[in-house]
Image (tube, rainbow, N blue to C red):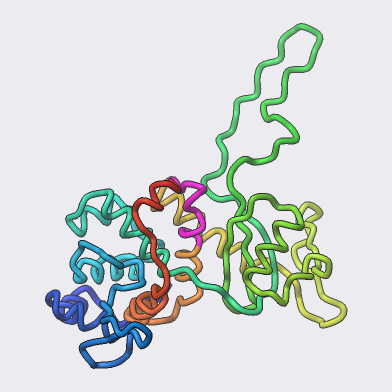
């Protein structure tokens, strides 16, 4: 992963105090140098945090800038425990802060091709096979059949050589996949009836499309799946299914901008946050 041109020392020079942080947020959001903004409809003056996940925040904007920098500059993210230690805030504040920054990372991609699904979290623990009893009957199966994996399903779609998007889906049936794809790209609403399949169980990992000559595979998607899995297992250790979408969105944001500069990521987050709010009460209800 490449996050260039903003060292820790350079960050401190750019954000020496609260006034400098506020000025940077204003430039990042409005791309102008004027000091006051007002709604053209009601003529009320707007704050730089209004209508964003930072709305009505009690934290200094310098703390917000520090948190955004730490999360964006890390290769796979930062846990709430570590973020609270580095910023000197409570765990609850760091947890809410991290999720609000992830909400600013959420995005929608355009034309995509290549679909796969992956299970989130660490692999299930191996169960010890029960010893055979001399009763003339086979021992019970250590893993119940027909129930599948109860962990959440994550649908990952990728443009060939381009961006990746990940969405949590309730099941892997056709209707759920079609609905998830339609929310990403409406042109794909009939894709489930037209897509090409690869049968990994038969050791088929690549196929040539006879109509286009394209080589069809899911290598890029599986690479992203591994990247997300390392973040979940190595950094966060546990991800609630109700919050998985935001963690997946954070990973996709990093993956799609591997070569961009860190400061560009930070400014993009500020602009992406417009129109998105994530109150603490709502977040706790979803926990």
Q: Nearer the viewer, residue 146 or 200?
A: 146
The extreme top residue here reads 135
- The magenta stretch spans which residues? 238-248
Query: In screen coordinates, is 83 left or right of 176?
Result: left
Horizontally, residue 13 falls left or right of residue 125, namely left
Vertically, is 285 above or below 58?
above
Q: Does 197 sit left or right of 29 as displayed?
A: right
Residue sticking out furthest to the bottom: 33
Question: How many numbered dots are placed on residues in this image?
Answer: 0
Task: State the residue at coordinates (18%, 67%).
Answer: 60
Q: In this view, does 49 lie above or below 244?
A: below
Q: Which residue lies furthest to the right in this view?
A: 210
The N terminus is located in which quarter?
bottom left
Identify which residue is drawn at 68% across, 69% down: 182
Give x and y (percent) for residue 141: 72, 25
Q: Position of residue 47 (x, y in %)?
A: 26, 77
Could you say where residue 211 lies in the image, as x and y percent from the top left?
A: 86, 81
The answer to whether 103 is drawn above or below residue 108 in the figure is above
Residue 223 lies within the magenta run: no
Q: Residue at x 73, y 73 (%)?
A: 188
Quarter of the figure with residue 160: bottom right
Q: Position of residue 15 (x, y in %)?
A: 17, 78
Residue 243 on the magenta segment: yes
On screen, residue 14 above or below 77: below
């Amino acid at each position: 992963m490449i996050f260039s041109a903003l060292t820790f020392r350079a960050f401190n020079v750019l954000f020496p105090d609260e006034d400098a942080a506020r000025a940077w947020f204003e430039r990042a959001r409005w791309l102008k140098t004027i000091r006051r903004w007002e709604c053209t409809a009601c003529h009320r003056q707007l704050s730089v945090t209004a209508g964003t996940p930072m709305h009505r925040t009690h934290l200094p904007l310098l703390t917000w800038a520090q948190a955004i920098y730490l999360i964006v500059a890390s290769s796979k993210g930062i846990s709430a425990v570590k973020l609270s230690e580095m910023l000197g805030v409570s765990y609850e504040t760091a947890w809410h802060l991290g999720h609000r920054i992830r909400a600013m990372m959420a995005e929608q991609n355009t034309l995509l091709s290549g679909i796969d699904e992956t299970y989130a979290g660490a692999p299930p623990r191996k169960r010890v096979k029960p010893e055979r009893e001399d009763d003339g009957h086979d021992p019970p199966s250590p893993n119940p059949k027909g129930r599948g994996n109860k962990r959440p399903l994550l649908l990952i779609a990728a443009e060939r050589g381009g961006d990746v998007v990940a969405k949590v889906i309730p099941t892997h049936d056709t209707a759920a996949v079609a609905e998830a794809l339609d929310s990403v790209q409406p042109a794909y609403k009939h894709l489930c009836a037209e897509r090409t399949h690869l049968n990994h169980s038969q050791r088929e990992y690549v196929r040539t499309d006879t109509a286009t000559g394209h080589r069809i595979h899911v290598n890029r998607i599986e690479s992203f799946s591994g990247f997300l899995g390392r973040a979940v297992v190595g950094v966060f250790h546990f991800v609630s299914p109700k919050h998985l979408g935001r963690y997946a969105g954070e990973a996709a944001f990093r993956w799609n901008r591997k070569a961009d500069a860190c400061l560009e990521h930070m400014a993009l987050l500020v602009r992406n946050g417009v129109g998105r709010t994530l109150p603490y009460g709502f977040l706790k209800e979803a926990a």
